[in-house]
Amino acid sequence: MTRSPEIAPSGDRNGRQMAQFRRGGVPRGEALLAAGQFAEAEVALRAELERDPRDAATLVALAGALDELGRHDEAAAFAQRAIGCDPDNRRAYALRGIALATIGRSNSAIAALQRAVALGNDDWYVHNALGSALHRQGDVDDAIAHLRRATRRAPKQAVARSNLGGVLTEAGHYDEGRVEHEAACALEPDNARFRMNRALGALANGEFTWGFEEYDYGLVPELRGERRYPEVAPWDGSALGQQTIVVYREQGLGDELIFGSCYGDLVAEAGHVVIECRGRLVPLFARTFPGATVRATRDQSPIPPVDVAVPAGSVARYRRATLDSFPRQRGYLVPDPAQVKHWSAWLRTLPGTRRGVAWCSGVVNATRRGAYPPLDDWQPVFAVPDTTFVCLQYGDSSADRAVIRDRFGVDVVVPPDLDLRDDLDGVAALAAALDEVVAVDNAVAALGGAVGAPTSVLVPAHSFTALGTDRWPWLPSVRIFERAPGATWEDAMAALAHALK
C-alpha cells in the first residue's frame, strides 16, 4: 500500500551520481564507466584486477559499475575489498553505504556512510543516502539534518530535494516539505515519482483537490501501474448519465480495497459500470455491486462497449473533494452471509474476545520495511488478557507463530481449511464475524475496514491514507495508531494495547 513519499538512497541510476568515483584509476575502465557503458566497464575492470587484485581504485570503480548495473550486493562486496586494501578510502565507504542502503541493509549502510563522512566525504549523494538510511531506521531528526546538508551541497539535485520533502512531511512540517517538493518538481517537471511524492505530501496534509489532481501523475508502471484502455476516453469527472464506465485496479490489494469504497458512487451515477479487479476479489465485488459487470483483470473475454475509463485511484479526484464526501457507513463490501454464519459458529468455540491479527505485509522491501513494527514490538498487544488471537496473516506464518508462542506465550489460532491468501471471500466473512481486526498497514486492515469490522491498524506518521485526520476516511470502522515521527513503535503499541484492554 502506497502511504508516504518514496525516500530513495541514490536517485535515478543514470551514471551521473557516480562521477566522483571516476577520478584516476584504470583509463579504459574509467572511460567506459564515465560513458555509461557499465557492462563493458565491468569486463575491463575485472581484467585490470587480474593484473593487480589489490588496487583499491580499480576495486572502487568496479563496485561503481556493479552498482549501476543493479548488482548492489556485489558492489558492496567489492567496495569492502577496496576498504581492506585502503582502510581510509572514503569513496569505498561511500559506495558501500549507497549499495547497502539501496538493498535495505540500513544499519550496515549507516555505519559505512558515517565512516565516509568522518573521513571527509562531504558529497551530496553521501548525505542523501545517509539521510535516507536514517529515515528508514526511524531517526527522522538526523535524516533531516543530512538531507538538508545534501540539498545545501547540491541544491539542483532533485532527488535530494524530493527526499527531504518526504521526511519533512512525515515529521509534520508540511509547509517546509512542500517547498522541497516544489523545488524537486521544478528541477525535473516530467519526473513522475517526484510529482507523486508531492501529491502524497499534499494529501497527507488534507489538501484533497490539488493533491488528488497531482496524484494522477503517478499513473506510470513503476508507481501506480499502467494506464489501461488507451483507446477509450479517460473519464474527466463529468456527469455519467447513461454512459458505461470501466474502472480498473491499480497498485496493491490494500489500495484496491480502499479505492473500492468509491465504486458505489459510479454505480449510482452511470448507466452501467464495469469493474476490473483481482480475480480473488470478483466474488466480493460481484455481491456488493450486483448491477455492475465484475471481471478479473486477466479475463480475456470481450467486455461490454464502454464510453469512458478511469483507474481506481483517480475516482477520488472527482468524488472526494472534502471530508464530508467520504462514506459514513462502516463498510461497503458485502461478505457471504452463509460463510459469516459458519465462522461465527466456529468463533463461539473460542474463549474471550476473538481478535484477528496480521503483523506484517506480504511485500516488505527496502522502502517499506520501516513502515511495519518488528515482531518483538508486539509484546504489549499479545499480553492483552481475555483474548483469543486468530491468524489473519497470509502466506506461511508458521515460523512467526512459533516465535509468538515461544516469546509471548500466545498460540495464534489458525482458522481451519481457509486459504488466508487466496480465499478473500472467506477471509472477508471471517473478518466480519470477528470481534475486532488488529493489523499493520496492509491488505488485512483494508479488508477488515471494507466489511465494516472494528479494525485497529498500526501506521507510520502522517500517512496518505489518513488524509490529515486521525482515522481512515475511506473506511470509517478503521481507527489508527500512529508511530510518532522519529519514534520507535513502542508508544503506538502501548496505545493500541491500552485501547484493546
Image (cartoon, rainbow, N blue to C red):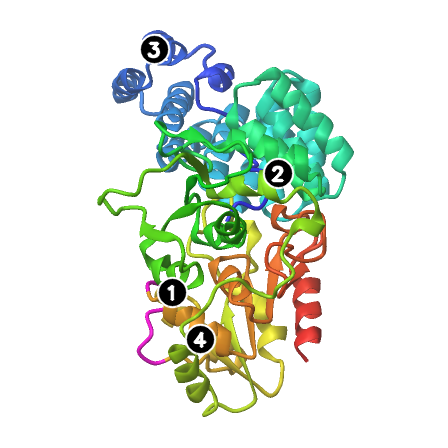
Residue identifier under label 3: 32
Structural crowding at the residue carrying mark 1, measured as other residues with C-alpha within 10 Å and reported as few (<14), some (14–19) or many (≥20): many
Between 223 and 159, the one nearer to me in the picture: 223
User: Sequence order check: which comes first, mark 1 or mark 3?
Assistant: 3
Q: Secondary structure at mark 3?
A: helix
Q: Return the x and y of residue 182 as percentages of the image width and height.
A: 67, 24
Q: Main secondary structure of the magenta part?
A: loop
Name the amino acid, label 2: Leu
Does the segment drawn in magenta span residue 134? Answer: no
Q: CA distance from mark 1 to mark 3?
A: 51 Å
Total labels: the figure holds: 4
Residue identifier under label 4: 430
User: Sequence order check: which comes first, mark 3 or mark 4?
Assistant: 3
Q: CA distance from mark 3 to mark 2?
A: 39 Å
Q: CA distance from mark 3 to mark 4?
A: 59 Å
Q: Return the x and y of residue 134 as percentages of the image width and height.
A: 62, 42
User: Sequence order check: which comes first, mark 4 or mark 1?
Assistant: 1
Residue identifier under label 2: 200
Frontmost of labels 3 and 2 is 2
Residue identifier under label 1: 424
Does the segment drawn in magenta span residue 418? Answer: yes
Q: Which residues fall within the magenta stretch?
A: 416-422
Which residue occupies 54% across, 46% down? 107
Q: CA distance from mark 2 to mark 4?
A: 32 Å
Name the amino acid, label 3: Leu
Name the amino acid, label 1: Leu
Residue 199 appears left or right of 248: right
Frontmost of labels 2 and 1 is 1
